Structures are given as structure tokens and as C-alpha cells.
Image (cartoon, rainbow, N blue to C red):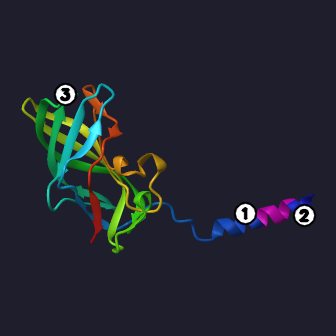
């Protein structure tokens, strides 16, 4: 019995001293491209359309972001409730899905620098009534490890949480890409 415990301890020590497994992460810098509306939807039927300005980028390690864009909040009938701009204040996280392939539609983009993932950004919304803090997540389904909940064309898009006001917590479609630079 003692011999078995010693063998297990030796095996655990050997595994622990080896290289760590690589998770879904990337230390690269990415351009964040979303020129057309990316949609998020709320439980009450409201939706938000979000675009990203040219030149926006993020870097997961060290956490850094420089991004701006526009948003429009619509009621279920498509009437504009509020529109404005947004500015990134900090990068919260980046869950890297991979590059080049889109398994959901069996596509090879042919470029190892076209990538996907979920990038979560703290933002400030500029509205006609003033500034409002919010949390924006952009989902891009490129990559072999996109989660099943987002691994469809409709899974691409955004979520936008505006604390105390509205939570667009479901993606509603869109087109975006992260370009590794």
C-alpha cells in the first residue's frame, strides 16, 4: 500500500513539473472589426444594434483595448428608444476560440490570422441623457472551439448589459472578425 502511494505521488509530481496545458487563450493583438450591425436581444423583446469603428483593437495579454463604436436601442416594433456612441474603458476578458475555420458552416477562411472568440469590454455609453457604464461582449464564431451556444451564424453578435436599465443577454446575429496583427 505504501509503495502504491509513493508511486502515485511520484506520478503526480512528474505531471505537475511538466508544461502546463494550453487553454483557450492568445497573447496576440487583434483588430476588432464589426462594420455592420451586431445584434443583442433582451427578454422583453428589445434589441440593440452595435457597430465598431475602424481601427479598434484589443490585446489579451497584457489586457488592453482601444475601441469605439455606435449603438441603437430598439423596442420590439423597431422604434428607436435611444442611440449614441460607446467607448471602451477596459478589457475584462478574452475567450479565444481559434482561427481560420468556422465549423458551424463548414468553412475554411484560408487565413490563420482571422480569429474568433468572446471579448468582454467595459464601456461607457454616450447617450442624449449623459454617460452610462455598461458591459459589451462581442462574439465571433470563428475557431474550432466556439461553444455550442454560439456555434451558429445566429450565435455571432453581441450582448450588452446596462446595469439597472436593460440586459441584452442573447446574441441576435451579426458579422464580425478578429484580425491577428
Residue under label 3: 77
Q: Does residue 145 appear left or right of residue 142 in this picture?
A: right
Residue 155 appears anywhere in the view: yes
Label 2 to label 1, Cα distance in Å? Answer: 14 Å
What is the secondary structure assignment of the residue under circle 3? loop
Residue at the spot 28% in from the left edge and 67% down from the top edge: 179
Which residue matches tag 1? 12
In front of the other: 18 or 175: 175
Indicate whether 95 appears above or below 77. below
Q: Are marks 3 and 1 in contact (CB under 8 Å)?
A: no
Q: Nearer the viewer, mark 3 or mark 1?
A: 3
Q: Is residue 61 visible?
A: no
* Circle number at residue 3: 2
- 2 or 1: tag closer to the N-terminus: 2
Q: Position of residue 71 (x, y in %)?
A: 16, 42
Q: Position of residue 42 (x, y in %)?
A: 30, 31
**Residue sitting farthest toward the left:** 128
Q: Which of the two residues, 99 or 76, is positioned nearer the viewer here?
A: 76
N-term-proximal mark, 2 vs 3? 2
Q: Which residues are magenta?
A: 5-10
User: Which quarter of the picture shows residue 50?
Assistant: top left
Indicate whether 105 appears above or below 86.
below
Residue at 47% in and 59% down: 145
Q: Residues within 10 Å of mark 1 (few under 14, many from 20)?
A: few
Amino acid at each position: 500500500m505504501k509503495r502504491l502511494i509513493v508511486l502515485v505521488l511520484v506520478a503526480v509530481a512528474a505531471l505537475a513539473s511538466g508544461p502546463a496545458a494550453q487553454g483557450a487563450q492568445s497573447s496576440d493583438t487583434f483588430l476588432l472589426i464589426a462594420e455592420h450591425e451586431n445584434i443583442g436581444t433582451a427578454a422583453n423583446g428589445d434589441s440593440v444594434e452595435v457597430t465598431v469603428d475602424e481601427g479598434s483593437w484589443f490585446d489579451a495579454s497584457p489586457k488592453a483595448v482601444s475601441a469605439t463604436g455606435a449603438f441603437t436601442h430598439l423596442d420590439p416594433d423597431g422604434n428607436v428608444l435611444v442611440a449614441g456612441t460607446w467607448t471602451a474603458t477596459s478589457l475584462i476578458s478574452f475567450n479565444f476560440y481559434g482561427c481560420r475555420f468556422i465549423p458551424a458552416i463548414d468553412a475554411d477562411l484560408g487565413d490563420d490570422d482571422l480569429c474568433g472568440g468572446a471579448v468582454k469590454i467595459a464601456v461607457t455609453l454616450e447617450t442624449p441623457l449623459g454617460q452610462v457604464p455598461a458591459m459589451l461582449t462581442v462574439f465571433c464564431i470563428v475557431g474550432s472551439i466556439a461553444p455550442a451556444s454560439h456555434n451558429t451564424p445566429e450565435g455571432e453578435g453581441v450582448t450588452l448589459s446596462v446595469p439597472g436599465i436593460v440586459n441584452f443577454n442573447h446574441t441576435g446575429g451579426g458579422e464580425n472578425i478578429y484580425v491577428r496583427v
